[in-house]
Amino acid sequence: MNSESWTSRLAKERVVIVPSLLAADFANLEREIRKLEAGGAQVLHIDVMDGLLVPNITVGAPVVASIRKVTSLKLDVHLMIVEPERYVEAFRKAGADSLSVHIEAVPDPTEILQKIRALGATPGLVLNYGTPLEKIAPYAQLADVLLTMSVPAGFGGQKFHPDVLDSVRVLRKLARPDALIEIDGGIDVDTIGSAAEAGVNFFVVGTGVFRAEDYGAQMKLLKKAAFNALSAR
Ligand code: DX5
Ligand code: ZN
């Protein structure tokens, strides 16, 4: 079978808003997910932190499995953990559709990206804020998702760092044409346009969605701001 991958299908949409559950009400995750589904979300971003690679601790595979049970949306799992090779299988079994690992955790990610693909998930590679682009550049073609952090990974609600857009522009050129170019951190209506112009097509948004009353309306506003910037070029 030669069916198109879900990531290359989404890449064609040019602007995909990916809500980050880190900013959701964790006591009412199912209700939050229903609101996102009704608002038109196609993908949910789940932040996994271990307190070692990043200073914060969040959720593990059991929570991903619980989310998987209540939704058919794609699950984009951002692994902010050391030794991710120990856990990718568990997260895949839990229902992750994409698994992204940090270059700071795996300096040569060749093997783990292959492993993720062999498990049937989409392999993603992440560059944290402050890590030189040269670290990730040699491996750009091996990933279907290339995620640039626009804040230091670890917490939601931080301020966007526009200097990362230079790295995004280079990664866009190095990546496979059908790869998703993802950005994460401080994306909101006032920052999304510049990211879109730099070549991002996959926009993780935490507080920028969840602090709104109406998630669907907010996602539409974000999408519109991105498309406005693209058409003004
Ligand atoms: C931060 C996480 C993000 C976070 C983004 O380390 O990787 O996914 O949820 O939150 P905002 O959009 O609020 O910056
Ligand atoms: Zn994230």
Image (tube, helix red, strand yellow):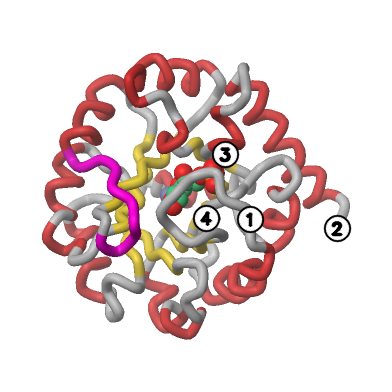
Residue at label 1? 160
Which of disc 1 and disc 3 is earlier in sequence?
Answer: 3
Which residue matches tag 4? 182
Identify residue type, mark 2.
Arg
Q: Are marks 4 and 3 in contact (CB under 8 Å)?
A: no
Nearer mark to the viewer, of 2 and 3:
3
* Circle 2: element type: loop
The secondary structure type at the circle numbered 3 is strand
Q: Magenta part of the protein: which range?
A: 52-61
Please report contact status of discs 2 and 3: CB closer than 8 Å, yes or no: no
Secondary structure mostly seen in magenta is: loop
Left-right relation of 84 to 80: left
**Label 1 neighbour load within 10 Å: few <14, some 14-19, many 20+:** some
Give the mark toward the camera: 4 or 1.
1
48 or 9: which is nearer to us? Answer: 48
Q: Earlier in the sequence, mark 2 or mark 1?
A: 1
- Disc with the residue nearer the chain's start (2 vs 4): 4
Image mark count = 4
Residue at x 56%, y 36% (from the top left corner): 207
Q: Quadrant of residue 140?
A: bottom left
- Queried on whether the Cβ of the residue with tag 1 lies below 8 angstroms from ligand 1, the answer reads yes
Which numbered disc covers residue 233? 2
Mark 2 or 1, closer to the camera: 1
Mark 4 or mark 3, which has the lower sequence index?
3
Please state which amino acid type lies under the numbered disc 1. Answer: Phe
Q: Would you call the spot at circle 3 few (<14 residues within 10 Å), some (14-19), or many (20 or more)?
A: many
Is 190 in the magenta?
no
